[in-house]
Image (spheres, rainbow, N blue to C red):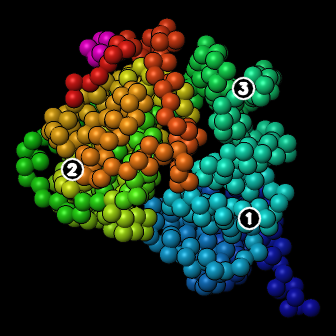
Amino acid sequence: MTETVSENWQDRELARAMASYARGELAAAQKVAQAIIRRDRNFSPAWFFLSKLAQAVGQKPHAVKLLDTALQLQPGEPRYLAFKAYLLATALQVNEALQLLAGLASADLDDALIYSDIGNAYHICGELELARAAFQRALDLAPDSAYHQYNLATSCKFVGEFEQAEALADQVLVRHPDDWTVYEFRSGLRKQTPARNHVQQLEGLLDKGIASQKGEVQVACALGKEYEDLGDLGGAFRNFKRAADRRREGMDYRVSGDVEAMATIAEVYDGAFFREQEGCADDRAIFIVGLPRTGTTLLERIISAHTDVFAAGELQNFGNELIRLVTRATPGIKHDKVSMVRAAAGLDHRELGQAYIDSTRSRTGNALRFIDKLPMNYLYLGAIAAALPGARLIHMDRHPMDAAYAIYKTLFTQAYPFSYSLEDLGHYYVAYRKLMDHWHTQLGERLLHVQYEQLVGDPEGQARRVIAALGLDWQDGCLEFYKSAQPTNTASAVQVRQPVYASSVAKWRQLEDELRPFRDILERAGLPHDPDFLPAS
Protein backbone atom coordinates (compact mmCIF):
# COMPACT_ATOMS: atom_id res chain seq x y z
CA MET A 1 0.00 0.00 0.00
CA THR A 2 2.82 2.37 0.86
CA GLU A 3 4.48 1.63 -2.50
CA THR A 4 1.26 2.44 -4.39
CA VAL A 5 0.90 5.78 -2.60
CA SER A 6 4.56 6.52 -3.34
CA GLU A 7 4.00 5.81 -7.03
CA ASN A 8 0.80 7.83 -7.37
CA TRP A 9 1.35 11.11 -5.56
CA GLN A 10 3.48 12.42 -8.45
CA ASP A 11 0.69 11.73 -10.95
CA ARG A 12 -1.89 13.42 -8.74
CA GLU A 13 0.27 16.52 -8.30
CA LEU A 14 1.08 16.64 -12.01
CA ALA A 15 -2.62 16.45 -12.81
CA ARG A 16 -3.10 19.43 -10.48
CA ALA A 17 -0.37 21.35 -12.33
CA MET A 18 -1.96 20.55 -15.67
CA ALA A 19 -5.37 21.73 -14.41
CA SER A 20 -3.81 25.05 -13.38
CA TYR A 21 -2.21 25.34 -16.82
CA ALA A 22 -5.55 24.67 -18.53
CA ARG A 23 -7.07 27.56 -16.54
CA GLY A 24 -4.26 29.86 -17.68
CA GLU A 25 -2.65 29.91 -14.22
CA LEU A 26 0.88 29.37 -15.50
CA ALA A 27 2.75 30.50 -12.38
CA ALA A 28 0.69 28.15 -10.21
CA ALA A 29 1.26 25.27 -12.64
CA GLN A 30 5.01 25.88 -12.61
CA LYS A 31 5.10 26.03 -8.82
CA VAL A 32 3.37 22.66 -8.45
CA ALA A 33 5.62 20.97 -11.05
CA GLN A 34 8.77 22.35 -9.42
CA ALA A 35 7.55 21.05 -6.06
CA ILE A 36 7.25 17.57 -7.58
CA ILE A 37 10.84 17.71 -8.78
CA ARG A 38 12.13 18.85 -5.41
CA ARG A 39 10.61 15.70 -3.89
CA ASP A 40 11.43 13.36 -6.79
CA ARG A 41 14.04 14.57 -9.29
CA ASN A 42 13.68 11.34 -11.28
CA PHE A 43 10.03 11.89 -12.20
CA SER A 44 10.52 12.64 -15.90
CA PRO A 45 6.90 13.70 -16.71
CA ALA A 46 7.35 16.75 -14.45
CA TRP A 47 10.46 17.81 -16.37
CA PHE A 48 8.53 17.29 -19.61
CA PHE A 49 5.65 19.39 -18.33
CA LEU A 50 8.00 22.20 -17.30
CA SER A 51 9.57 22.06 -20.76
CA LYS A 52 6.16 22.49 -22.38
CA LEU A 53 5.44 25.34 -19.99
CA ALA A 54 8.73 27.07 -20.80
CA GLN A 55 8.04 26.80 -24.52
CA ALA A 56 4.55 28.24 -24.03
CA VAL A 57 5.97 31.40 -22.44
CA GLY A 58 8.70 31.82 -25.07
CA GLN A 59 11.66 30.42 -23.12
CA LYS A 60 12.79 28.08 -25.88
CA PRO A 61 16.42 27.45 -24.83
CA HIS A 62 15.25 26.67 -21.29
CA ALA A 63 12.56 24.38 -22.70
CA VAL A 64 15.24 22.37 -24.53
CA LYS A 65 17.32 21.98 -21.35
CA LEU A 66 14.33 20.79 -19.33
CA LEU A 67 13.33 18.36 -22.06
CA ASP A 68 16.86 16.96 -22.29
CA THR A 69 16.67 16.18 -18.58
CA ALA A 70 13.41 14.29 -19.17
CA LEU A 71 15.07 12.34 -21.99
CA GLN A 72 18.06 11.46 -19.82
CA LEU A 73 15.66 10.00 -17.29
CA GLN A 74 13.52 8.21 -19.87
CA PRO A 75 15.43 7.80 -23.16
CA GLY A 76 13.37 7.00 -26.23
CA GLU A 77 10.05 8.15 -24.76
CA PRO A 78 7.98 9.06 -27.87
CA ARG A 79 6.24 12.02 -26.18
CA TYR A 80 9.59 13.60 -25.40
CA LEU A 81 11.12 12.84 -28.79
CA ALA A 82 8.15 14.30 -30.66
CA PHE A 83 8.31 17.49 -28.62
CA LYS A 84 12.10 17.63 -29.08
CA ALA A 85 11.54 17.46 -32.84
CA TYR A 86 9.09 20.35 -32.56
CA LEU A 87 11.54 22.44 -30.52
CA LEU A 88 14.32 21.73 -33.01
CA ALA A 89 12.03 22.72 -35.87
CA THR A 90 11.11 26.02 -34.20
CA ALA A 91 14.83 26.67 -33.77
CA LEU A 92 15.13 25.96 -37.52
CA GLN A 93 17.39 22.96 -36.92
CA VAL A 94 15.50 21.19 -39.66
CA ASN A 95 17.92 18.36 -40.37
CA GLU A 96 18.01 17.33 -36.70
CA ALA A 97 14.22 17.59 -36.38
CA LEU A 98 13.63 15.42 -39.43
CA GLN A 99 16.04 12.78 -38.13
CA LEU A 100 14.04 12.50 -34.91
CA LEU A 101 10.77 12.39 -36.82
CA ALA A 102 12.09 9.63 -39.07
CA GLY A 103 12.78 7.56 -35.97
CA LEU A 104 9.16 7.98 -34.87
CA ALA A 105 7.66 7.22 -38.27
CA SER A 106 7.29 3.47 -37.77
CA ALA A 107 5.95 3.70 -34.22
CA ASP A 108 2.29 2.87 -33.64
CA LEU A 109 1.44 5.43 -30.97
CA ASP A 110 -1.85 5.95 -29.18
CA ASP A 111 -1.43 9.53 -27.93
CA ALA A 112 -3.06 12.28 -30.00
CA LEU A 113 -0.81 14.96 -28.50
CA ILE A 114 2.28 13.12 -29.72
CA TYR A 115 0.94 13.23 -33.26
CA SER A 116 0.10 16.90 -32.77
CA ASP A 117 3.73 17.67 -31.94
CA ILE A 118 4.85 15.52 -34.89
CA GLY A 119 2.48 17.36 -37.21
CA ASN A 120 3.59 20.77 -35.99
CA ALA A 121 7.24 19.82 -36.43
CA TYR A 122 6.67 18.51 -39.96
CA HIS A 123 4.74 21.67 -40.81
CA ILE A 124 7.58 23.95 -39.73
CA CYS A 125 10.04 21.78 -41.66
CA GLY A 126 7.95 22.24 -44.81
CA GLU A 127 6.83 18.61 -45.02
CA LEU A 128 3.17 19.53 -45.41
CA GLU A 129 1.84 16.16 -46.55
CA LEU A 130 3.49 14.39 -43.63
CA ALA A 131 2.08 17.06 -41.32
CA ARG A 132 -1.40 16.40 -42.68
CA ALA A 133 -1.06 12.67 -42.05
CA ALA A 134 0.08 13.28 -38.47
CA PHE A 135 -2.79 15.68 -37.76
CA GLN A 136 -5.25 13.17 -39.24
CA ARG A 137 -3.89 10.51 -36.90
CA ALA A 138 -4.25 12.88 -33.94
CA LEU A 139 -7.89 13.53 -34.81
CA ASP A 140 -8.55 9.81 -35.29
CA LEU A 141 -7.36 9.27 -31.73
CA ALA A 142 -9.29 12.26 -30.32
CA PRO A 143 -12.20 12.84 -32.72
CA ASP A 144 -13.96 15.39 -30.49
CA SER A 145 -10.94 17.67 -30.10
CA ALA A 146 -11.40 21.10 -31.68
CA TYR A 147 -7.64 21.61 -31.40
CA HIS A 148 -6.90 18.62 -33.60
CA GLN A 149 -9.75 19.53 -35.96
CA TYR A 150 -8.23 22.95 -36.59
CA ASN A 151 -4.71 21.58 -37.01
CA LEU A 152 -6.01 19.17 -39.64
CA ALA A 153 -8.02 21.93 -41.32
CA THR A 154 -4.92 24.09 -41.79
CA SER A 155 -3.02 21.14 -43.26
CA CYS A 156 -5.91 20.36 -45.60
CA LYS A 157 -5.74 23.92 -46.90
CA PHE A 158 -2.04 23.71 -47.68
CA VAL A 159 -2.42 20.44 -49.61
CA GLY A 160 -5.43 21.76 -51.55
CA GLU A 161 -8.30 20.00 -49.74
CA PHE A 162 -10.38 23.14 -49.31
CA GLU A 163 -13.84 21.60 -48.81
CA GLN A 164 -12.51 19.31 -46.08
CA ALA A 165 -10.78 22.28 -44.45
CA GLU A 166 -14.01 24.31 -44.41
CA ALA A 167 -16.04 21.43 -43.00
CA LEU A 168 -13.53 21.03 -40.17
CA ALA A 169 -13.55 24.78 -39.50
CA ASP A 170 -17.33 24.73 -39.24
CA GLN A 171 -17.12 21.90 -36.72
CA VAL A 172 -14.66 23.86 -34.59
CA LEU A 173 -16.92 26.93 -34.56
CA VAL A 174 -19.95 24.90 -33.45
CA ARG A 175 -18.11 24.03 -30.24
CA HIS A 176 -16.02 27.19 -29.93
CA PRO A 177 -17.80 30.20 -31.45
CA ASP A 178 -15.24 32.52 -29.86
CA ASP A 179 -12.27 30.90 -31.63
CA TRP A 180 -11.70 34.02 -33.72
CA THR A 181 -8.76 32.63 -35.71
CA VAL A 182 -11.06 30.12 -37.37
CA TYR A 183 -13.35 32.78 -38.86
CA GLU A 184 -10.49 34.42 -40.73
CA PHE A 185 -9.13 31.04 -41.79
CA ARG A 186 -12.52 29.86 -43.08
CA SER A 187 -13.25 32.99 -45.12
CA GLY A 188 -10.01 32.55 -47.01
CA LEU A 189 -10.68 29.00 -48.18
CA ARG A 190 -12.79 29.94 -51.21
CA LYS A 191 -14.39 32.85 -53.00
CA GLN A 192 -17.57 33.77 -51.17
CA THR A 193 -20.76 34.13 -53.22
CA PRO A 194 -24.13 35.88 -52.68
CA ALA A 195 -25.70 32.47 -52.08
CA ARG A 196 -22.99 31.18 -49.75
CA ASN A 197 -21.15 33.54 -47.43
CA HIS A 198 -20.77 34.45 -43.75
CA VAL A 199 -21.24 38.23 -43.95
CA GLN A 200 -24.29 38.37 -41.69
CA GLN A 201 -22.65 36.20 -39.06
CA LEU A 202 -19.41 38.22 -39.10
CA GLU A 203 -21.25 41.56 -38.98
CA GLY A 204 -23.22 40.28 -35.99
CA LEU A 205 -20.06 39.35 -34.12
CA LEU A 206 -18.52 42.78 -34.66
CA ASP A 207 -21.76 44.58 -33.77
CA LYS A 208 -21.95 42.72 -30.45
CA GLY A 209 -18.36 43.65 -29.73
CA ILE A 210 -15.31 41.43 -29.36
CA ALA A 211 -13.30 42.00 -26.21
CA SER A 212 -10.16 40.44 -27.63
CA GLN A 213 -8.09 42.79 -29.78
CA LYS A 214 -6.75 39.84 -31.75
CA GLY A 215 -10.28 38.50 -32.18
CA GLU A 216 -11.58 41.80 -33.54
CA VAL A 217 -8.67 41.93 -35.99
CA GLN A 218 -9.34 38.43 -37.27
CA VAL A 219 -13.11 38.82 -37.65
CA ALA A 220 -12.80 42.24 -39.32
CA CYS A 221 -10.21 40.83 -41.73
CA ALA A 222 -12.53 37.89 -42.51
CA LEU A 223 -15.42 40.26 -43.17
CA GLY A 224 -13.28 42.45 -45.41
CA LYS A 225 -12.30 39.44 -47.48
CA GLU A 226 -15.92 38.34 -47.88
CA TYR A 227 -17.07 41.84 -48.89
CA GLU A 228 -14.29 41.92 -51.48
CA ASP A 229 -15.41 38.57 -52.87
CA LEU A 230 -18.92 39.96 -53.20
CA GLY A 231 -17.69 43.03 -55.10
CA ASP A 232 -18.15 45.61 -52.32
CA LEU A 233 -14.65 47.09 -52.19
CA GLY A 234 -15.78 49.98 -50.02
CA GLY A 235 -17.09 47.62 -47.35
CA ALA A 236 -14.00 45.48 -47.79
CA PHE A 237 -11.56 48.34 -47.25
CA ARG A 238 -13.50 49.66 -44.25
CA ASN A 239 -13.05 46.33 -42.50
CA PHE A 240 -9.47 45.82 -43.63
CA LYS A 241 -8.66 49.23 -42.17
CA ARG A 242 -10.39 48.35 -38.93
CA ALA A 243 -8.32 45.19 -38.71
CA ALA A 244 -5.06 46.96 -39.58
CA ASP A 245 -5.65 49.83 -37.16
CA ARG A 246 -6.35 47.45 -34.30
CA ARG A 247 -3.36 45.27 -35.17
CA ARG A 248 -1.08 48.32 -35.31
CA GLU A 249 -2.14 49.46 -31.82
CA GLY A 250 0.56 48.74 -29.30
CA MET A 251 3.02 47.32 -31.83
CA ASP A 252 6.60 48.21 -30.94
CA TYR A 253 7.63 48.96 -34.51
CA ARG A 254 9.24 51.97 -36.19
CA VAL A 255 9.57 51.88 -39.94
CA SER A 256 12.60 54.18 -39.72
CA GLY A 257 14.65 51.22 -38.45
CA ASP A 258 13.95 49.22 -41.58
CA VAL A 259 14.56 52.26 -43.81
CA GLU A 260 17.96 52.79 -42.19
CA ALA A 261 18.84 49.11 -42.50
CA MET A 262 18.06 49.05 -46.24
CA ALA A 263 20.12 52.18 -46.84
CA THR A 264 23.01 50.54 -44.96
CA ILE A 265 22.70 47.39 -47.06
CA ALA A 266 23.05 49.42 -50.26
CA GLU A 267 26.04 51.26 -48.79
CA VAL A 268 27.87 48.11 -47.67
CA TYR A 269 27.17 45.86 -50.64
CA ASP A 270 28.64 48.12 -53.30
CA GLY A 271 30.71 47.41 -56.39
CA ALA A 272 33.91 46.97 -54.40
CA PHE A 273 32.28 44.29 -52.26
CA PHE A 274 31.32 42.15 -55.25
CA ARG A 275 34.81 42.36 -56.78
CA GLU A 276 36.35 40.81 -53.66
CA GLN A 277 34.15 37.73 -53.17
CA GLU A 278 34.57 34.06 -53.94
CA GLY A 279 31.58 31.86 -53.22
CA CYS A 280 30.37 28.28 -53.11
CA ALA A 281 30.24 26.44 -56.45
CA ASP A 282 26.81 24.85 -55.90
CA ASP A 283 24.46 26.23 -58.58
CA ARG A 284 21.15 24.50 -57.83
CA ALA A 285 19.35 27.28 -55.96
CA ILE A 286 16.75 29.57 -57.54
CA PHE A 287 15.78 32.52 -55.35
CA ILE A 288 12.49 34.33 -55.98
CA VAL A 289 12.37 37.59 -54.05
CA GLY A 290 10.15 40.64 -53.73
CA LEU A 291 7.51 42.07 -51.47
CA PRO A 292 4.80 39.68 -50.23
CA ARG A 293 1.59 39.40 -52.27
CA THR A 294 3.31 40.35 -55.52
CA GLY A 295 3.00 37.01 -57.35
CA THR A 296 6.03 35.17 -55.98
CA THR A 297 3.98 32.04 -55.27
CA LEU A 298 2.44 32.11 -58.75
CA LEU A 299 5.89 32.27 -60.32
CA GLU A 300 7.16 29.53 -58.02
CA ARG A 301 4.33 27.23 -59.09
CA ILE A 302 4.97 27.87 -62.78
CA ILE A 303 8.70 27.13 -62.47
CA SER A 304 8.30 24.14 -60.14
CA ALA A 305 5.88 22.51 -62.57
CA HIS A 306 9.09 21.77 -64.51
CA THR A 307 10.23 18.23 -63.78
CA ASP A 308 13.80 19.35 -63.01
CA VAL A 309 12.78 21.85 -60.31
CA PHE A 310 11.71 21.28 -56.70
CA ALA A 311 9.78 23.94 -54.77
CA ALA A 312 11.36 24.01 -51.32
CA GLY A 313 9.03 26.75 -50.05
CA GLU A 314 9.80 29.87 -48.04
CA LEU A 315 13.07 28.81 -46.46
CA GLN A 316 14.49 30.79 -43.56
CA ASN A 317 17.83 29.07 -44.01
CA PHE A 318 19.94 31.75 -45.67
CA GLY A 319 19.22 34.45 -43.11
CA ASN A 320 19.61 31.97 -40.26
CA GLU A 321 22.99 30.74 -41.49
CA LEU A 322 24.18 34.30 -42.03
CA ILE A 323 23.18 35.30 -38.50
CA ARG A 324 24.75 32.15 -37.06
CA LEU A 325 28.08 32.81 -38.78
CA VAL A 326 28.06 36.50 -37.82
CA THR A 327 27.37 35.61 -34.19
CA ARG A 328 30.18 33.04 -34.23
CA ALA A 329 32.65 35.42 -35.86
CA THR A 330 31.71 38.41 -33.70
CA PRO A 331 30.82 37.23 -30.17
CA GLY A 332 28.84 39.79 -28.25
CA ILE A 333 27.75 41.71 -31.33
CA LYS A 334 24.64 43.83 -30.91
CA HIS A 335 21.83 42.22 -32.87
CA ASP A 336 20.48 45.50 -34.20
CA LYS A 337 19.95 45.49 -37.95
CA VAL A 338 22.67 47.97 -38.92
CA SER A 339 25.39 46.24 -36.87
CA MET A 340 24.44 42.86 -38.32
CA VAL A 341 24.51 44.21 -41.88
CA ARG A 342 28.00 45.64 -41.50
CA ALA A 343 29.36 42.51 -39.81
CA ALA A 344 27.79 40.17 -42.39
CA ALA A 345 29.73 41.76 -45.24
CA GLY A 346 32.97 40.52 -43.71
CA LEU A 347 32.01 36.84 -43.67
CA ASP A 348 33.71 34.12 -45.66
CA HIS A 349 31.02 33.93 -48.33
CA ARG A 350 32.16 30.56 -49.63
CA GLU A 351 31.54 29.17 -46.15
CA LEU A 352 28.20 30.98 -46.00
CA GLY A 353 27.09 29.51 -49.31
CA GLN A 354 28.12 25.98 -48.31
CA ALA A 355 26.43 26.33 -44.92
CA TYR A 356 23.20 27.37 -46.65
CA ILE A 357 23.32 24.46 -49.11
CA ASP A 358 24.08 21.96 -46.33
CA SER A 359 21.19 23.30 -44.25
CA THR A 360 18.73 22.71 -47.09
CA ARG A 361 19.71 19.17 -48.02
CA SER A 362 17.15 17.48 -45.80
CA ARG A 363 14.48 19.36 -47.75
CA THR A 364 15.95 19.53 -51.26
CA GLY A 365 17.78 16.20 -51.45
CA ASN A 366 19.44 15.74 -54.83
CA ALA A 367 17.09 17.99 -56.81
CA LEU A 368 18.71 19.36 -59.97
CA ARG A 369 17.25 22.80 -59.12
CA PHE A 370 15.32 24.00 -56.09
CA ILE A 371 13.39 27.18 -55.42
CA ASP A 372 13.79 29.20 -52.24
CA LYS A 373 10.80 31.51 -52.30
CA LEU A 374 11.20 33.58 -49.14
CA PRO A 375 10.17 37.03 -50.43
CA MET A 376 12.24 38.96 -47.90
CA ASN A 377 15.46 37.40 -49.16
CA TYR A 378 15.68 40.56 -51.26
CA LEU A 379 17.40 42.03 -48.19
CA TYR A 380 20.15 39.39 -48.57
CA LEU A 381 20.60 39.55 -52.34
CA GLY A 382 24.13 40.94 -52.05
CA ALA A 383 25.21 38.17 -49.70
CA ILE A 384 23.36 35.53 -51.74
CA ALA A 385 24.99 36.66 -54.98
CA ALA A 386 28.44 36.53 -53.37
CA ALA A 387 27.92 33.26 -51.48
CA LEU A 388 26.29 31.42 -54.38
CA PRO A 389 27.57 32.88 -57.65
CA GLY A 390 25.81 30.12 -59.61
CA ALA A 391 22.39 30.69 -58.04
CA ARG A 392 19.60 32.09 -60.20
CA LEU A 393 18.02 35.28 -58.86
CA ILE A 394 14.53 36.48 -59.78
CA HIS A 395 12.86 39.68 -58.63
CA MET A 396 9.05 39.50 -58.78
CA ASP A 397 7.51 42.96 -59.02
CA ARG A 398 4.02 44.43 -59.08
CA HIS A 399 2.38 47.81 -59.57
CA PRO A 400 3.03 49.65 -56.28
CA MET A 401 -0.61 50.60 -55.67
CA ASP A 402 -1.90 47.06 -56.21
CA ALA A 403 0.97 45.70 -54.14
CA ALA A 404 0.14 48.10 -51.31
CA TYR A 405 -3.52 47.10 -51.24
CA ALA A 406 -2.72 43.38 -51.40
CA ILE A 407 -0.25 43.68 -48.53
CA TYR A 408 -2.43 45.97 -46.41
CA LYS A 409 -5.43 43.66 -46.53
CA THR A 410 -3.47 40.54 -45.55
CA LEU A 411 -3.25 39.44 -41.93
CA PHE A 412 0.26 38.03 -41.63
CA THR A 413 1.01 35.71 -38.74
CA GLN A 414 4.28 37.27 -37.59
CA ALA A 415 6.24 38.96 -40.36
CA TYR A 416 5.85 42.31 -42.14
CA PRO A 417 5.02 44.71 -39.27
CA PHE A 418 5.11 47.61 -41.75
CA SER A 419 1.94 46.30 -43.41
CA TYR A 420 -0.66 47.59 -40.94
CA SER A 421 -0.32 51.30 -41.68
CA LEU A 422 -0.47 52.88 -45.13
CA GLU A 423 2.07 55.46 -44.01
CA ASP A 424 4.51 52.80 -42.75
CA LEU A 425 3.90 50.83 -45.91
CA GLY A 426 4.65 53.89 -48.04
CA HIS A 427 7.96 54.66 -46.34
CA TYR A 428 8.93 50.99 -46.44
CA TYR A 429 8.08 50.74 -50.13
CA VAL A 430 10.23 53.76 -51.02
CA ALA A 431 13.21 52.19 -49.21
CA TYR A 432 12.51 48.82 -50.85
CA ARG A 433 12.41 50.38 -54.31
CA LYS A 434 15.71 52.18 -53.75
CA LEU A 435 17.34 48.94 -52.60
CA MET A 436 15.97 46.95 -55.54
CA ASP A 437 17.24 49.60 -57.96
CA HIS A 438 20.63 49.22 -56.28
CA TRP A 439 20.58 45.44 -56.71
CA HIS A 440 19.61 45.70 -60.37
CA THR A 441 22.49 48.12 -60.93
CA GLN A 442 25.04 45.93 -59.13
CA LEU A 443 23.86 42.55 -60.39
CA GLY A 444 22.78 43.53 -63.89
CA GLU A 445 21.40 40.71 -66.03
CA ARG A 446 22.03 38.20 -63.27
CA LEU A 447 18.94 39.51 -61.46
CA LEU A 448 15.97 38.64 -63.67
CA HIS A 449 13.04 41.04 -63.39
CA VAL A 450 9.51 39.64 -63.78
CA GLN A 451 6.51 41.98 -63.71
CA TYR A 452 3.30 40.51 -62.29
CA GLU A 453 1.07 42.38 -64.74
CA GLN A 454 3.07 41.02 -67.69
CA LEU A 455 3.04 37.50 -66.25
CA VAL A 456 -0.75 37.34 -65.91
CA GLY A 457 -1.23 39.15 -69.23
CA ASP A 458 1.02 36.80 -71.20
CA PRO A 459 1.59 33.67 -69.08
CA GLU A 460 3.19 31.57 -71.79
CA GLY A 461 5.48 34.29 -73.11
CA GLN A 462 6.74 35.24 -69.66
CA ALA A 463 7.00 31.63 -68.50
CA ARG A 464 9.10 30.74 -71.54
CA ARG A 465 11.35 33.74 -70.88
CA VAL A 466 11.91 32.71 -67.25
CA ILE A 467 12.49 29.01 -68.01
CA ALA A 468 15.03 29.93 -70.69
CA ALA A 469 16.81 32.32 -68.31
CA LEU A 470 17.12 29.46 -65.83
CA GLY A 471 18.90 27.34 -68.44
CA LEU A 472 16.08 24.79 -68.65
CA ASP A 473 14.29 23.29 -71.62
CA TRP A 474 10.67 24.33 -72.04
CA GLN A 475 7.94 21.98 -70.76
CA ASP A 476 4.26 22.58 -71.52
CA GLY A 477 3.39 21.46 -67.99
CA CYS A 478 4.66 24.81 -66.70
CA LEU A 479 1.40 26.37 -67.92
CA GLU A 480 -0.68 23.80 -66.04
CA PHE A 481 0.90 24.47 -62.65
CA TYR A 482 -2.54 24.70 -61.03
CA LYS A 483 -3.03 20.96 -61.56
CA SER A 484 -0.05 20.15 -59.38
CA ALA A 485 -0.70 18.48 -56.03
CA GLN A 486 2.44 20.09 -54.59
CA PRO A 487 1.54 21.56 -51.16
CA THR A 488 2.09 25.26 -50.52
CA ASN A 489 2.20 27.11 -47.22
CA THR A 490 1.62 30.74 -48.22
CA ALA A 491 -1.14 33.33 -48.16
CA SER A 492 -1.77 32.39 -51.81
CA ALA A 493 -2.41 28.69 -51.13
CA VAL A 494 -5.94 28.90 -52.57
CA GLN A 495 -5.27 31.21 -55.54
CA VAL A 496 -2.36 29.24 -56.99
CA ARG A 497 -4.54 26.19 -57.49
CA GLN A 498 -6.46 28.11 -60.15
CA PRO A 499 -5.40 29.02 -63.70
CA VAL A 500 -3.76 32.42 -64.16
CA TYR A 501 -6.27 35.26 -63.77
CA ALA A 502 -5.86 39.03 -64.12
CA SER A 503 -8.78 40.26 -62.01
CA SER A 504 -6.43 41.71 -59.39
CA VAL A 505 -4.67 43.99 -61.88
CA ALA A 506 -5.44 47.70 -61.33
CA LYS A 507 -7.92 46.94 -58.54
CA TRP A 508 -6.41 49.91 -56.71
CA ARG A 509 -8.20 52.23 -59.14
CA GLN A 510 -11.44 51.51 -57.28
CA LEU A 511 -9.79 52.54 -53.99
CA GLU A 512 -7.81 55.63 -54.97
CA ASP A 513 -9.13 57.78 -52.14
CA GLU A 514 -8.64 55.09 -49.50
CA LEU A 515 -5.04 54.43 -50.63
CA ARG A 516 -4.17 58.13 -50.83
CA PRO A 517 -1.81 58.10 -47.76
CA PHE A 518 0.40 55.52 -49.48
CA ARG A 519 0.27 57.28 -52.83
CA ASP A 520 1.17 60.65 -51.31
CA ILE A 521 4.41 59.22 -49.92
CA LEU A 522 5.33 57.78 -53.32
CA GLU A 523 4.64 61.14 -54.96
CA ARG A 524 6.84 62.99 -52.47
CA ALA A 525 9.62 60.46 -53.15
CA GLY A 526 9.24 60.94 -56.91
CA LEU A 527 8.25 57.35 -57.57
CA PRO A 528 5.83 56.55 -60.42
CA HIS A 529 2.47 55.05 -59.57
CA ASP A 530 0.47 55.40 -62.80
CA PRO A 531 -1.41 52.44 -64.35
CA ASP A 532 1.40 51.77 -66.83
CA PHE A 533 4.06 51.68 -64.10
CA LEU A 534 7.12 49.65 -64.91
CA PRO A 535 10.34 50.15 -62.92
CA ALA A 536 13.37 51.43 -64.77
CA SER A 537 15.26 48.31 -63.68
Q: Which residues are magenta?
A: 523-528
Q: Earlier in the sequence, mark 2 or mark 1?
A: 1
- Tell me where residue 59 sits by quadrant: bottom right
Q: Distance of mark 2 from mark 1, alpha carbons?
A: 43 Å
Q: Which mark is residue 138?
A: 1
Instruction: Give the residue type at disc 3.
Output: Thr
Q: Earlier in the sequence, mark 3 or mark 2?
A: 3
- Tell me where residue 277 sits by quadrant: bottom left
Tell me if residue 525 is in the magenta stretch: yes
SS state under label 1: helix
| Residue underneath mark 3 | 193
Instruction: Give the residue type at disc 1.
Output: Ala
Residue 120 appears in the figure: yes
For the residue carrying disc 3, how many other residues have a C-alpha within 10 Å: few (<14), some (14-19), or many (20+)?
few
Residue 31 appears in the figure: no
503 left or right of 341 in image: right
| Residue underneath mark 2 | 385
Q: Earlier in the sequence, mark 1 or mark 3?
A: 1
> Where does residue 448 sit, x and y in percent of width and height?
25, 40
